[in-house]
Image (cartoon, rainbow, N blue to C red):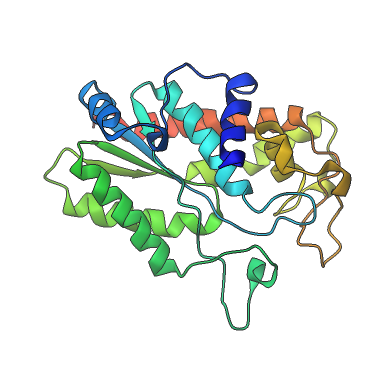
């Protein structure tokens, strides 16, 4: 709870700034949510994260804190949206023997059908209370298939209703080539890029919540430390650039998906 409140404090004091009103449903009463929907906030963002090892320097909650912060910014910029609690667990591989990140302490994985079932249950609950556009974003690669499947299933089931589910895969898939080009303009070398806890990953976390990264422990991949790439030149400036690019393209994708057809 202290870490959660610390995140909110950081977001309110620094990057990015927020209006006084909250968009976080967890911090609202049932009556406040009811009144917000009645006042026109009929879009809701369902952020999914993941709880996994991120090497010796970055906390296991990276995906959850990052997607929450980004979802808040997106909701404020949309102007008519709220944000649910983060779905914190996602498929991470096999248990016996463990594969992928499950080889490392702190990683918590769930089966694919369990994750998809959780997303579906959340979406069905939101429909009951009057939300019309339910937006799914995932900060972890294994969030995407389940979100796509749930959106396809429920959009078919609810075709005769005004409710739509929008799985916004571009939030995660993004523009890797473009991001890397921008980082290279800021002094990062191509060989520093990786797929996990690298300079890109680490910079975003330093920008969003620097307390989640122990800079004195940053080290390049050595095949054993859970890092893929080299995060040692990560910075808040790079993180801000990457975060804004993610938010801008996600916001654009949401608006296009929600637009009348």
Location of residue 112 in the rendering, given as x and y in whole percent from the top left corner = 44, 67
Left or right placement of residue 15 versus residue 72 in this view: right
Q: Which of 175 and 231 lies nearest the eye of the viewer?
A: 231
Q: Is residue 18 above or below residue 239?
A: above
Considering only vertical position in the picture, is 95 above or below 114? below
Q: Quadrant of the C terminus?
A: top left
Q: Residue furthest left?
A: 160
Residue 242 at x, y percent in the picture: 66, 33
Left/right placement of residue 223 relative to residue 89 reads right
Q: Nearer the viewer, residue 190 or 9?
A: 9
Identify which residue is drawn at 75% across, 43% down.
213
State the quadrant of the N terminus: top right
Q: Which residue shows up at 57% across the image and 34% down it?
A: 5
Q: Residue furthest bottom?
A: 96
Image coordinates of residue 96 in percent, x first then y, are 59, 83
Residue drawn at (45%, 22%) of the image: 77
| Number of marks in picture | 0
- The answer to which quarter of the image holds residue 255 is top left
**Which residue is at a point 39% across and 54% down the rendered structure image?**
147
- Up the image or down, 39 lies above or below 176; here it is above
Question: Is residue 222 left or right of 47 when viewed as pictured?
Answer: right
Check the image and name the residue furthest to the top.
19
């Amino acid at each position: 709870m202290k870490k959660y409140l610390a995140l909110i404090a950081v977001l309110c004091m620094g990057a990015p700034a927020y209006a006084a009103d909250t968009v976080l449903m967890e911090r609202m009463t049932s009556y406040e949510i009811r009144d917000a929907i009645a006042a026109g906030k009929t879009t809701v963002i369902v952020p999914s994260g993941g709880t996994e090892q991120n090497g010796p320097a970055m906390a296991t909650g990276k995906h959850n804190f990052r997607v929450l912060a980004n979802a808040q910014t997106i909701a404020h910029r949309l102007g008519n949206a709220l944000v649910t609690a983060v779905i914190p667990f996602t498929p991470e591989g096999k248990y016996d023997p463990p594969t992928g990140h499950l080889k490392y302490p702190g990683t918590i994985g769930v089966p694919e059908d369990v994750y998809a079932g959780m997303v579906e249950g959340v979406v069905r609950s939101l429909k009951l209370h009057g939300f019309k556009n339910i937006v799914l974003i995932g900060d972890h690669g294994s969030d995407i298939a389940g979100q796509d499947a749930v959106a396809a299933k429920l959009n078919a089931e609810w075709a005769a209703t005004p409710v739509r589910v929008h799985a916004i895969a571009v939030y995660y898939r993004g523009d890797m080539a473009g991001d890397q080009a921008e980082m290279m303009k800021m002094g990062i070398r191509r060989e520093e890029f990786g797929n996990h806890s690298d300079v890109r990953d680490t910079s975003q976390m330093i920008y969003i919540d620097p307390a989640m990264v122990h800079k004195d422990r940053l080290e390049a991949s050595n095949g054993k430390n859970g890092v893929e790439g080299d995060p040692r030149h990560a910075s808040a400036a790079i993180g801000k650039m990457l975060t804004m690019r993610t938010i801008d393209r996600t916001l654009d994708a949401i608006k296009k998906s929600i637009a009348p057809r």
